[in-house]
Amino acid sequence: MNYPKTVQLIDVGPRDGLQNEKQTVPADIKIRLIEMLEAAGIRKLEATSFVSPKWVPQMGDNAEVMGGLKRRSDVCYSVLTPNMKGFEAALPFRPDEVVIFGAASEAFSQKNINCSIAESIERFAPVAAAAKQHGIKVRGVISCTVGCPYEGDIAPEKVAYVTKLMRDIGAEHIGIADTIGVGTPLKIQRALEAALQYVDLDHLSGHFHDTYGQALANTLAALQLGVWQFDTSVAGLGGCPYAKGATGNVATEDVVYMLHGMGIDTGIDLDKLIDAGQMISDFLGRPSPSRVARAVLNKRQAA
Ligand code: HMG
Ligand code: MG
């Protein structure tokens, strides 16, 4: 099996991870988390979203977070922008990348962004065009690519269809998301292969929630296809407010441990990453679900 030699992990903890938290997480804690991720070697991250604060109150401090960051030139800062209103609000902060986020399921599209798939593409098209004009990269993320909380199983053809729509309006990179973590390795491979009809391996990433404990296996299945970019979340934070019951993304710590054990380079210092995960877990007042973080912390305590 030919695995990639290097993998890029995009930590989505500050955005996907925290968007679903009920307790307010102040902007300075979000900024500290981002700085600790950078110190651990994370070079691409989702900092926040420019969505409606009525829909996702936790991201209402997007301007404070983006304005308060000491930006590094070697880090790519991505933000979610579902429409022109979000893009215009994000633009003064010069994100390196904007994320337009659609779904392979009509019902999820309605629940999450209040419009059909076709309408979402109409809203994303001017965002992608404006981003390009300003030299900002555009990533399209597709939710519910294997299963949907409202529609059940999702056919790979739907993933191919939305990938093509996103590519046609200018998304340079496509993220394949298992929003509710129901995917298993072969289903994930089918969803990725569907997307690969329209994008190449260098412009494709996996985004796997770990609700059913399949995300590491799904990551391995994606690696076997040659996928080398993944969204992961420090301390396994995450969840979408419009996908009830779905838990966090696969923990960055767990993926890093697996990859390093396979001799795959990530540029990440696992110990420093665990410190970042511990900081945010302490703040949230609960232990990290990352098995690797738990094992390392137990070992540290014993030493
Ligand atoms: P809408 O209600 O259809 O929008 O919401 P609208 O254009 O009709 O406007 C209604 C009101 O919202 C107006 O305010 C607008 O100004 C305001 P009012 O006049 O009533 O006071 N508004 C906005 N405010 C701030 N920022 C904006 C914005 N747009 C409109 N960008 C909208 C449409 C998309 C905004 C809404 O449905 C929304 O914010 N949804 C939240 C979606 C979200 O953040 N979901 C979680 C992230 S996605 C995710 O987690 C999945 C992912 O991780 C992959 C995976 O795991 O699947 C990426
Ligand atoms: Mg997600």
Image (cartoon, rainbow, N blue to C red):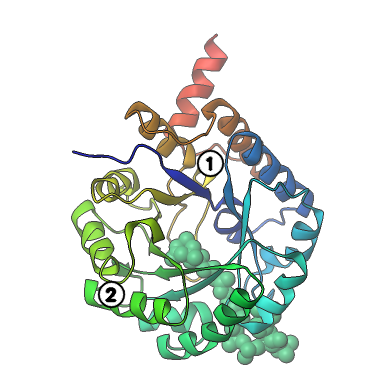
Percent position (x, y) of residue 143? 40, 69
- The correct choice, above or below, for 252 with respect to 19 in the image is above
Percent position (x, y) of residue 156? 23, 71
SS for dot 1: helix
- The correct choice, above or below, for 76 with respect to 255 in the image is below
SS for dot 2: helix
Number of the label disc, if any, that sits on residue 235? 1
Percent position (x, y) of residue 118? 42, 90
Q: Quadrant of the N terminus?
A: top left
Number of other residues with Cα within 10 Å of mark 2, as a class: few under 14, some 14 to 19, many 20 or more: many
Identified at 71% across, 50% down, the residue is 30
Between 39 and 109, the residue placed more toward the observer is 39
Task: Report whether 254 appears left or right of 286.
Answer: left
Callout 2 amino acid: Ala
Between 4 and 119, the residue placed more toward the observer is 4
Q: CA distance from mark 1 to mark 2?
A: 31 Å
Callout 1 amino acid: Ala
- The correct choice, above or below, for 116 with respect to 170 in the image is below
Identified at 68% across, 65% down, the residue is 59
Number of the label disc, if any, that sits on residue 160? 2
Image quadrant, ligand 1: bottom right
Q: Residue furthest top?
A: 303
Q: Quadrant of the C terminus?
A: top right
Between 113 and 246, the residue placed more toward the observer is 113
Identified at 53% across, 11% down, the residue is 302
Task: Report whether 137 appears left or right of 158.
Answer: right
